[in-house]
Image (spheres, rainbow, N blue to C red):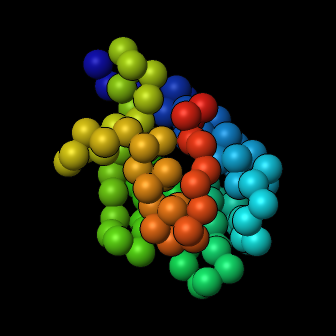
Amino acid sequence: MSLTEARFHDLVDATQQALEDIFDESDLDIDLESSAGVLTVKFENGTQLIFSRQEPLRQLWLAARSGGFHFDFNEEDNNWQCDTSDELLSEMLTRLVFEQAGVELDFDEI
């Protein structure tokens, strides 16, 4: 069963808000920009994470230094999963933030 458009936007909005909260509460020196449904996280070293919604596909996309990743929402497990590796968004973010910023953050709540 695919997500309705409204449910998809609610999920992405909630996910992006949770991400903003996690980054705001961290001690990282970062810039957060949220505009037109795109959340950009700029780290002190110049690298970025960019989260965007792909409405026609009902996916959350993530651009990172190591590549681009597409996530589908799994209603049964209530989480975002990468469509190629099945890695959870929370797990991937923990790894990517460590790779790009050298810091461990906990993303379990997304």
Question: Where the N terminus falls, by quadrant?
Answer: top left
Residue drawn at (75%, 54%), measured in percent from left and top? 26
Q: Nearer the viewer, residue 3 or 93?
A: 93
Residue 102 falls in image quadrant: bottom right
* Placement of the C terminus among the 4 image quadrants: top right
- Nearest the camera: 94 or 39? 94
> Residue visible at 44% across and 29% down?
79
Question: 79 or 2: which is nearer to us?
Answer: 79
Asked if residue 81 lies left or right of residue 101, the reply is left
x and y percentages locating residue 99 in the rendered image: 46, 68
Q: Is residue 54 visible?
A: no
Residue 18 falls in image quadrant: top right
Q: Is residue 77 left or right of residue 41?
A: left
Residue 32 x %, y % = 72, 65
Residue most toward the bottom?
A: 46
41 to 65, vertically: above or below? above
